[in-house]
Image (cartoon, rainbow, N blue to C red):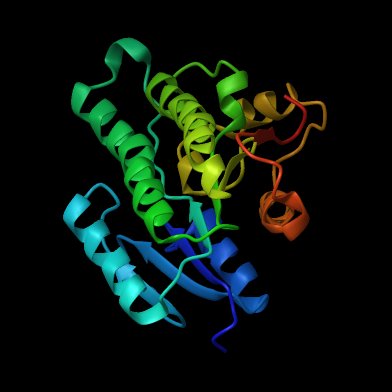
Amino acid sequence: MMDKKVMLITGVTRGVGRELASHYFKQEYRVIGCGRGEVEHYRYFQLDVTDEVAVADMFTSIRNREGRLDVLINNAGIGSMNAFLLTPTQKVREIYETNVIGSFLMMREAAKLMKPGGRIVNIGSAGTRMNIKGEAAYLSSKAALESLTLLAAQELGPKNITVNAVAPTPIKTDLLKGIPIEKIEALWKQQAIPRSAFHEDISNVIDFFLQPESDFITGQTIFLGGV
């Protein structure tokens, strides 16, 4: 039991995060989750990733109980479909606080606990290459996460901790609720492979990043679907 790798996944209460937690639990990782809702079946912290004190307390608890952290998957994220001119400033702040500042906090605290060989994987969005109208706040926050991935990789490389990202095309999650299916299908048609991303597409790339042989791959964002 004690030689299992310890993995922390953010935003596990639904969607991609929930599927990733299930996937890696079956692979016999010691999965730890966090999010705003409630979860059963594995160790879980109910918190907001933008709450610096709560995040620090969680990592102290992980250090005290597990003594290590091998993998961080930064999945927690929020979005909003609003025309640029009609997007409230508060909504922009909420998106950036979760998608950028929350991810920053998680990466910073995780890196303090990781030993050489640690892996950080961020969940981006292929939409940063698709220029989707009405997604200015969300996609610019994901573009910032791509930059953060590269810059953190530079600083953590000497510690032999890799930092990468996977950027899926539109996937059927709560983020797409309220968007007409015709618009989603039009986005899929912009891709080299015109279909929805599946959860397995995302976990496949993460599996690759986590392989011991991938220790020379860092600072990369893999875009799915051929955008």
Q: Is residue 28 left or right of residue 154?
A: right
User: Measuring 58% from the left and 62% from the top, which residue is drawn there?
Assistant: 20
Q: In the rendered image of this protein, does residue 132 appear above or below residue 17? A: above
Q: Is residue 184 above or below residue 163?
A: above
Query: In percent of the image, x 60 and y 58: which residue is there?
Result: 117
Q: Quadrant of the N terminus?
A: bottom right
Could you say where residue 37 lies in the image, as x and y percent from the top left? 32, 65
Q: In which quadrant is the C terminus drawn?
A: top right
Residue 149 appears in view:
yes
Taking the view exactly as shown, the residue that stands out farthest to the bottom is 1
* Picture layout, residue 196 above or below residue 206: above
Q: Nearer the viewer, residue 108 or 8?
A: 108
Name the quadrant containing residue 180.
Answer: top right
Query: Residue 138 at what x, y percent from top left?
Result: 42, 28
Q: Which one is in front, 159 or 4?
A: 159
140 sits to left or right of 189: left
Quarter of the rendering containing residue 216: top right
Mark count:
0
Tell me residue 185's x, y (percent). Answer: 68, 30
